[in-house]
Structure formats: C-alpha cells, structure tokens
Amino acid sequence: MGIAQPGQAPSILVTAMSIGMFCISFFVADPGGVITLVGVILACLASFIVFFHRDPERFIPRDENLILSPADGKIMFVERERSTGRRPTKEEFQSGKIVTEPLMGDWYPEPLSKPLSFNTEQRWEPVPVGSEHTSDVIRVAIYMSPLDVHVQRSPRKSKVLAMEHRTGKGLSRGPFRKASKKESEGNERVRTVLQSDDGMLIEINQISGALARTIIPFCSISDQLNRGQRYGMIRLGSRVDIRVPANGITPLVEPNNMVLAGSSPLFRIE
C-alpha cells in the first residue's frame, strides 16, 4: 500500500508535528494536557491524509481487448450518446447561432465533422433506441465517494493527445455540485484525450465534486501511458466520465456496479 505523490509531503509533515508534540509533552512539560491533545489531533489528521491518499497496487489485466476503468467507485450510468454541438471558434461566435447554457457555457449547435476525434469539448445527448449510428459514443460515469481510492489510471496503453481545464461559464473555479448527481458534469473538470496503439481515441473527464476542489494531473500532453498507469487524482468525493467509440464496443458494466481503477474492465473491443 503506497501513498500518492500529492499526499506524501503533507503526511510526513503532519506526522512529524504530531511526534514533536508528543516529545514535548513527554520530555518537557504538558500543563493541562493541551500539548498531548494537539498531538492526538495531529496524529488523527495524519492518519486521514494517509488514508485518503492511499494508492494500492493493482492487478492489471493483460487482455488488450479490454478497456479498463480509469477510477475506483460506483457506476452511475452507462449511456449511448451522440454529439449535437461543440465549442465555437471565434468565427462561429459571430454567426448568431450560439447556444448558451448556465453551467456548461457556449455551444455551436453542430457536431464536429469527426465527433470521435474529440478535438474539442462537445455537447452530447442520449441516442434513442433504434437510431444508433457509427459516430455514437458510449459514456460510463463513475462516482467516487470520499472513501474510495482517488488515483486515476489509464484504461489502455496510450498517448496523451490533449488535456484541457474547464469551469462553469464566467467562473475561474467551479461550480461544485454533488458529484453523485448527473448535472455535476458541468462542474470544474479536466478533459483528457488518449490515443491507444490501434488508433482508438478515448475521452476521460475528471470532474470535481461538492467537496473535491483540486484535480491533479500526473502527466502532460505527448506522454506515453502504460495500461493501468497512474495519470492523475482528484481530492475527496468526485466523479470520472469515460467516453469510447460505440462501434465494435460491448459494455461490461451496469449501474451500481463497483469498479477498481486499472483492474476492472468497462468495455470489450469486439
């Protein structure tokens, strides 16, 4: 059981402070037991930091036809979607066609010519049964409670093509709605696009929650990631969404299933 890099320095510092308080109490003086109490509080805080930043080793399936879960947690939903809009260019802003949503911001109401390229953030809507198309995607949303491991892992051996930070319209940070609610997809988020060796593109959104306020990437654009390799984390309760091309993909999970990052398969490539 390891500790994720963002938690290593804080856990060492708080642990050292706790030990210092106990040493002062034992070797010097502790009027009224105040110093001992502070030491106990710091020890509890250090334990919480270590628990939250825990980063256990995982069994990584070797089957290249499996797309693994990027996060620990509970499956919120599995949904087939189609792009109905995209982030506008400067020229498209002048077209008069812009649609503005309170949280998600401005959309140009036409999909990309190649929606599965994930070149920019897109607006997606559920696909009615019987209207399926090869340009559809399948999205799996994973809710991470404060008790889950919060380190994210790469679902396939891949290269990082793009990363972008998004917030609500007009906000420098946030919003921070409950991650367990579907509308939290408009929360502050980091969108990452991965390309696997066979050319498949995968979009992953790390979404902050009501308590989570920090998304920490471990990688950069052009980095090569191995299957199951750690690529980032979110502090406290949060959510991770993954989108993959629907054509030739079979989902292996259902709502309320529990999954482990880098270990549990979400999809099989047929």
Image (cartoon, grey):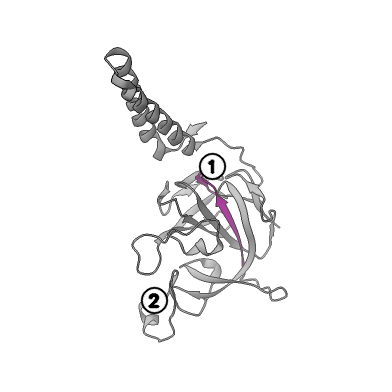
Where residue 228 appears, as percent x and y from the top left, is: 56, 44
Disc 2 to disc 1, C-alpha distance: 41 Å
Tell me the quarter of the image containing the C terminus: bottom right
How would you classify the magenta stretch by its main secondary structure? strand
Where residue 130 appears, as percent x and y from the top left, is: 73, 75
Q: Which amino acid does the dot numbered 2 rest on?
A: Thr
133 or 189, which lies in front? 189
Which residue occupies 39% across, 76% down? 89
Q: Is residue 205 magenta?
A: no
161 or 79, which lies in front? 79
Residue 61 is left or right of residue 217, and the answer is right
Q: Give the answer, above or below, for where 209 lies relative to 25.
A: below
Q: Furthest-right residue in view?
A: 130
Q: Which residues are magenta?
A: 137-154
Task: Count neighbours of disc 2 (C-alpha within 10 A) and say few if under 14, some if 14 to 19, many if 20 or more.
Answer: few
Residue 147 shows up from this direction = yes
What is the secondary structure assignment of the residue under circle 2? loop
> Residue 147, labelled with which disc?
1
Which residue occupies 64% across, 42% down? 61
Q: Which residue is mark 2?
A: 89
Q: Is residue 138 magenta?
A: yes
Q: Which amino acid does the dot numbered 1 rest on?
A: Leu
